[in-house]
Structures are given as C-alpha cells and as structure tokens.
Image (cartoon, grey):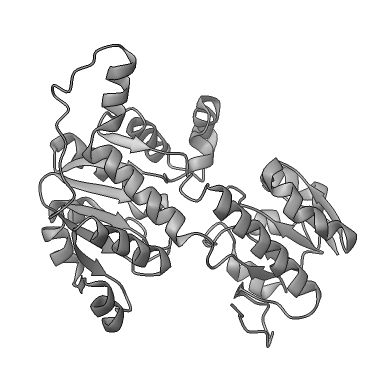
C-alpha cells in the first residue's frame, strides 16, 4: 500500500522505517491540510497527528484513501461521518501514556502551587528571596476529576499519593473503581462547588464543548485552580479570562488551547482575520491567556516523553500492518457496511 506519514519527527523514523520493506512509505514534517492534500491523491493510508485537519474538503482530494491511522487517542480532527460513508477506516492509539499525561497534570499543578515560573525567573535575575512567593499544599485539598477513563484514573492515583481528597464526575461512573481508588462520584454542580482544583480528562464532543462556561465558573469556589490537558474547546476561553481576572479562578494550567495551529505564530494569528471558519475573538482570547501571569501554558506537550512517543509509533505501525493484513484493529470508525469490529 501507498502510505504517507504526516507531521513526522526524526525520533519517529526508526519505528516507521521497517514498514518500507512491505509498503511504499513516504513522510513529511508538514500537517495534512487542504493545500497539501492534492499532492497525495494516490495515498491509500495516511498517518497524522492532531494538527492535521482531515475534513471533507481535504478527504475529497484523496479518492484512494482506505485508512487514516491517527497517532493520537483523540480523533476530533477527523470527519468520521465522511470516512464512514466513503469506505475509509479510522484507527487510533487508544492507550499510550495515561501515566504520561497524568504526570503532566501534576507538573502544571505543582508549578502553580509552588509558583515555580516566578521563583525561577526571580532566581535567574539574581533576586534570591522567597518574599511574595508563598504557595499552597496539595495535601488535604479536594481535586475534582472530570472524566475517569485511563488518564483520569491515573490522575486520581497520583492525587491520592499527595493525600488529596478526590471527587469525580463521569457519564458512566464505576462504583468498583471508586472503592478501589478511594474517591467519590458526584454531579458536576457539587464537584464545581467543592473542588479546590479541577482537572479535565474528557474527549472533545458536542456535549463537552465549553463545559467550563461562565455558568460553570460561577458555581466554583473562589480561588479554584483549573488544569486542562485534554482538549482546548472544553473551556470557553473568554469566560476563563474573566474568571482569572476576577479571582474566581486563581490560576490555570493549560496544555491545550482551541485553534492551536493558528496561534503558533504571530503571522498565522493575523492571517486568521480573513479565515471565516475561525472566530477571531477566540483566537485573541487564547493569545491573551499566553500573557497572563496566573496562567501556565505548555504547547500540547503532555504526551511528549520518549516512552510515550515510542508507544504511539509502535501502535500506529501495528494498526497499519493489521489493516493491510485484513484484520483491522483499534478502529474508531469503519466503513458503512463493514463487519469489522474494534480490537484492542
């Protein structure tokens, strides 16, 4: 099969190189987008990361496409309806680093609780004084975990190690899990009202978009800390800025923002004025977050450890090989009429 790998980094090459003996494999560092899709019209398999936008306009230019093997757990960057209707299977990496992302949750939280960015900046400037840098303990605080899937469960395990109390909310609560890990499920209103820290660990879905809205922030404790390592559109950015400004939210640790590709460069932000599919107000709001002193933003790097990247690459290669051999695995979308079931 003709396989094209997008958004490739040198560290991924060794894992994917072995496929070259069985398939026609090419790669590029660029994401797959509308302008670039036509050059790969004969590709039968594409593998992308989350910064590619595989919408109808892109996929229509690739009539030979049979499989999208995304190197991520999330697949909200792919038009699943189009894929299902046009015979394109979609496979993801269902598990590669629940501990990796959960550790990043606490990297952000500890940086906030111990005011590490300010402390490091002060020390580097030669002002070696702790005055005005008082933080807070995690022990005894209540962590609200929204989403108790693989990552959420690992967040809870770490939190219990820090002697935090844990409340959780999930569309499908697991009583046995709660008993095993020592936490309690509750409704969102109660979680918002009692949590000192809130960690988002749910996928981007229509029902989760802007789940942290102005109304949600109004229900929270004054001085709450918000951590988001999941998807940027879970939070109404403008509402978050207002909450941060008023003090309702004391600080935020964000590994994700909406429209991340458009805010990577100043030039792209300016050019976005002319792009009808994005709301400039949201883009400017995201940009404001990057400048706020009580916000820590990392560039969607929670997954980015040697071990996790290796696991992502290995699983993706296995997904492509399994598909080529007629035994697809880890499918999140199969063509209409397909009898194939997901295997994990």
Q: Nearer the viewer, residue 38 or 291?
A: 291
Q: Quadrant of residue 160?
A: bottom left
Q: In the displayed structure, would residue 64 be above or below residue 308?
A: below
Residue at point 70% right, 57% down?
47
Residue 300 shown left or right of residue 10 in the figure:
left
Q: In the displayed structure, would residue 200 be above or below residue 306?
A: below
Q: Quadrant of residue 20?
A: bottom right
State the quadrant of the C terminus. bottom right
Q: Is residue 9 visible?
A: no
Q: Is residue 22 visible?
A: yes
Q: Tell me residue 176's x, y (percent).
A: 29, 83
Residue at point 60% right, 59% down?
311
Q: Nearer the viewer, residue 234 or 227?
A: 227
Q: In the displayed structure, would residue 302 be above or below residue 164?
A: above
Q: Nearer the viewer, residue 160 or 326?
A: 160
Q: Tell me residue 165's x, y (percent).
A: 17, 62
Q: Tell me residue 60's x, y (percent).
A: 73, 59
Residue at point 21% right, 52% down?
197
| Residue at the bottom extreme, as displayed | 339
Q: Tell me residue 6's x, y (percent).
A: 70, 49
State the quadrant of the N terminus. bottom right
Residue 283 shown left or right of residue 26 in the figure:
left
């Amino acid at each position: 099969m003709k396989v094209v790998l997008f958004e490739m980094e040198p560290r991924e090459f060794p894992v994917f190189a072995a496929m070259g003996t069985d398939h026609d494999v090419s790669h590029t560092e660029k994401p797959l987008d509308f302008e670039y899709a036509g050059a790969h019209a004969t590709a039968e398999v594409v593998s992308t990361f989350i910064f590619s936008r595989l919408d109808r306009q892109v996929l229509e230019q690739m009539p030979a496409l049979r499989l999208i093997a995304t190197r991520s757990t999330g697949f909200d960057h792919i038009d699943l309806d189009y894929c299902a209707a046009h015979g394109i299977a979609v496979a993801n990496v269902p598990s590669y680093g629940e501990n990796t992302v959960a550790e990043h949750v606490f990297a952000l939280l500890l940086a906030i609780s111990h005011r590490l960015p300010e402390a490091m900046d002060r020390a580097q400037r030669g002002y070696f004084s702790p005055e005005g840098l008082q933080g807070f303990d995690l022990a005894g605080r209540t962590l609200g975990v929204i989403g108790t899937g693989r990552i959420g469960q690992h967040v809870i395990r770490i939190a219990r190690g820090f002697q935090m109390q844990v409340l959780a909310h999930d569309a499908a609560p697991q009583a046995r899990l709660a008993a095993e890990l020592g936490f309690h499920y509750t409704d969102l209103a109660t979680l918002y009202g009692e949590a000192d820290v809130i960690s988002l660990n749910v996928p981007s879905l229509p029902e989760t978009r802007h789940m942290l809205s102005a109304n949600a922030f109004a229900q929270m404790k004054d001085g709450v800390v918000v951590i988001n390592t999941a998807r940027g559109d879970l939070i109404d950015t403008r509402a978050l800025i207002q909450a941060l400004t008023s003090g309702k939210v004391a600080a935020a640790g964000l590994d994700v923002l909406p429209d991340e590709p458009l805010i990577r460069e100043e030039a792209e932000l300016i050019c976005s004025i002319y792009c009808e599919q994005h709301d400039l107000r949201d883009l400017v709001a995201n940009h404001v977050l990057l400048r706020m002193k009580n916000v820590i933003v990392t560039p969607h790097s929670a997954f980015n450890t040697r071990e996790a990247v290796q696991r992502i690459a290995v699983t993706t290669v296995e997904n492509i090989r399994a598909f080529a051999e007629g035994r697809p695995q880890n499918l999140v979308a199969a063509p209409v009429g397909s009898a194939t079931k997901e295997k994990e």
